[in-house]
Amino acid sequence: MMMDPTLAEMGNHLSDAMKILESGKLESEQGKERRKLSWKDIPGPLQGDGQDVVSILQLVQNLMHGDDDQQGQRMQYVGEQGHMALLGHSLAAYISVLERERLRKLTTRILSDTTLWLCRLFRYENGSAYYHEDDREGLVKVCRLVINTHYEDYATEGFTMLSSKHPVIYQSAACRPGLGQHLCSQLALPLSCLCIVPCNTMFGSLHQMDVALLDKLIRDDRESGKVPLLLIANAGTPGAGHTDKLSRLKELCVQYNMWLHVEGVNLATLALGQVSSAVTAATKCDSMTLTPGPWLGLPAVPAVTLYRHEDPALSLAAGLTSSQPVEKLRALPLWLSLQYLGHDGILQRIKHASQLSQQLLEHLKTLASIKTSVEDELNSPVVVFRFSQDSAPSSGGSVEGYFAGERDVLDVLNRWLGEQLAQQVPLSGVDVVELEDEGTCVRFSPLMTAAALGTQENDVAALVEKLGEMIPVLSCTLRYRQDFKDEVLQQASLSYIEDLSWPGLGGVRYEPRATDLDEDKRQHSVEKINNDLLKKLMELDTDLYFSGGPEFCEEKNCIFIGMATEDLDVAELVETIVSIGREIEESGKLFENMTEVVRRGIQEAELQLQKANEEKLMEEGVLRQIPLVGPVLNWFSPVQASVKGRTFNLAEGCLDSTEPVYSVKAQMNKEASLDSPKSITKRFPGQKLFRRHGAGSDSVSDTSSVSQLEESFRETAHVQANNADEAEVPEERHVHIVEETALSDQRVPEGQETESVDTLR
């Protein structure tokens, strides 16, 4: 049979278009430059003469990729099998234009083939299939089918039939959140019709439905006149991949004439040769929902609900079957993809994902500080693990009982662990999951991610390697948190910040010692000091991470320290924080008093200069000050002038005398001392700070002395004053110029001498 050339051509064009859109190589460099300059996300007018296909595809590409040309932001590669699934949607629209009889025959063939293949793959004999976009929609249709089965006149009487005998839908507490509420909303049932069955609390798995309690709940509802309608069980819970006791649950459903629906990721393993007995029991249920899209890496393929029911009229009334041929074309993308992969290709993908889980699980068993949370470790395709303090290394001592809120601290550390692993090994597909009993855990579910990401064994090996590097960091951080808190509480100038959402040592706040400030000024001082302190800590040569805190932290103006290493010296770290904070506080006090100090110092300097001028007048006489007489008198009778060098000290606010002879060597020594101020960052050249094998706290205490702080600030302020106000404040350099001039030339005119001294004012 010859293929329709129009259909073949359309398939080729669609395949080429999808590849172009995926690669982002449609437009030229000139087109890219024009798009950057003119293209915006603003709707434009519809062109009257229309556009060609290339222009339209270019617009679609621009909308897909925007202005970001980075490769990391592009859509993921879906492969040939993905293109086949995407092609199915276009073919469905094309096939829908066929004449009705040919369309009916074609859709019946597609639907029957796909249903037969899926039932054989997943061992569900004599089943029917419903294909739907929303993976919850199949369960909604099944509930309508059960309601029509239990209430014979529901089709004509409607909700009045439910008022006398309320239906009850039972759901495990481990089911995905919001599923039961969605059912009640779509079926127009009150939430009182939903019964949440707790998981085992006395014995057995903490994630399996409590069968004994379910039995009691059903009997109580029947005695009160309610109708037990349907039970939702799990073959792989959304969180940890646990499977309920499906065999026992099926017995209860048969006993009380209830419908059993099963869903979960573990249903994918039904296609394998060896399946655990717990999952095999799902083949006896009344309905199950499959999601082959993520299992096989097929984008935009529908979910499938397989069910068994003998009355086609009720199935039609519930919406599980349709007389419209177009609706049956929903199965076309899956029909194409299953044929493209073949039976062996489907099994290989599911088997590969299961092997990745087993590979990771075997490596995790060798790590002492990692605890796994898997019900059936030999067959579960989902691996959930958690860093546990119970098995932390004994070299540093037990951390149990060190601090309050250990569970919260472990949760935030495990969240940090999951986020770091997902960031550093993105192809692994790990994510963070919150479990009610275990807390925050890291989940590896390759059945849901491996096909799309292309996860391989080397990615699992890289994941294990990174995990091995992070475990010591987690153990040390957990061990040093209490030590850090104790050290901070011993410092009067530090406040410890208790924030259990921070993955690290903890937080501190430097509190200024001044008590005479009002609340607003004190808050401003705390904010400024801690901001400057954070900047200085971030400049230190250390492996520690300093931050202003979590994004939604309630505490303000504080500093948070990140994860710790084995050789961390906590005492030195805290002493350094105190030392730098005290230095910043003292510097701030000097700057606050600078205006008053300079004002008083200038007044005092003016008085001293006036006094020096009077002494010079008395020493030389009045005649020498006359412009015409003075030079002549100095010619015949020279006077040995004694000029005193002066410098203005900003820190002290006064004039300091200089020696008559100011050697160049002394000046150079002072400049050398200015170039190498004492600093915490210079104490350990070539080494990281806060290491126990390095210098201890004695070196840190040197930097905290007030004398050195004032000396450093005095030198800095002196340089700033030279640049800021040369005219008003006399400088040491200017005074020495006058002094050297007077010493080198004894015949100085009287008028010039007077002017030189007067300039000091």
Image (spheres, helix red, strand yellow):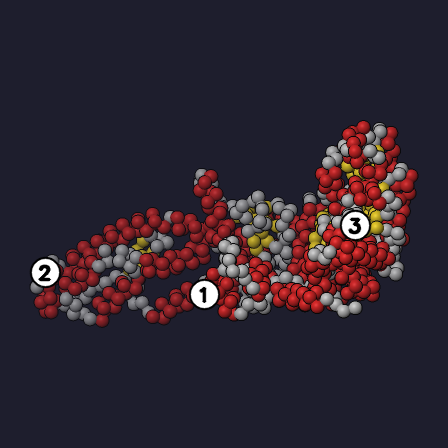
- Is residue 515 positioned above or below 649 on the image? above
Q: Nearer the viewer, mark 3 or mark 1?
A: 3
Query: Is 308 or 417 nearer to us in this picture?
Result: 308
The reply, left or right, for residue 345 in relation to residue 429 is right
Q: Which mark is residue 130?
A: 3
Q: CA distance from mark 2 to mark 1?
A: 51 Å
Residue at image mark 2: 626
Q: Which mark is residue 676?
A: 1
Local SS, label 3:
strand
**Which quarter of the rendered picture does the C terminus lie within?**
bottom left
Local SS, label 2:
loop
Q: Nearer the viewer, mark 2 or mark 3?
A: 3
**Which quarter of the rendered picture does the N terminus lie within?**
bottom right
Q: Residue 211's spot in the image, x, y percent?
A: 86, 41
Badge 3: few (under 14), some or many (20 or more) residues near its Cα, within 10 Å?
many
The residue shown at (63%, 65%) is 17
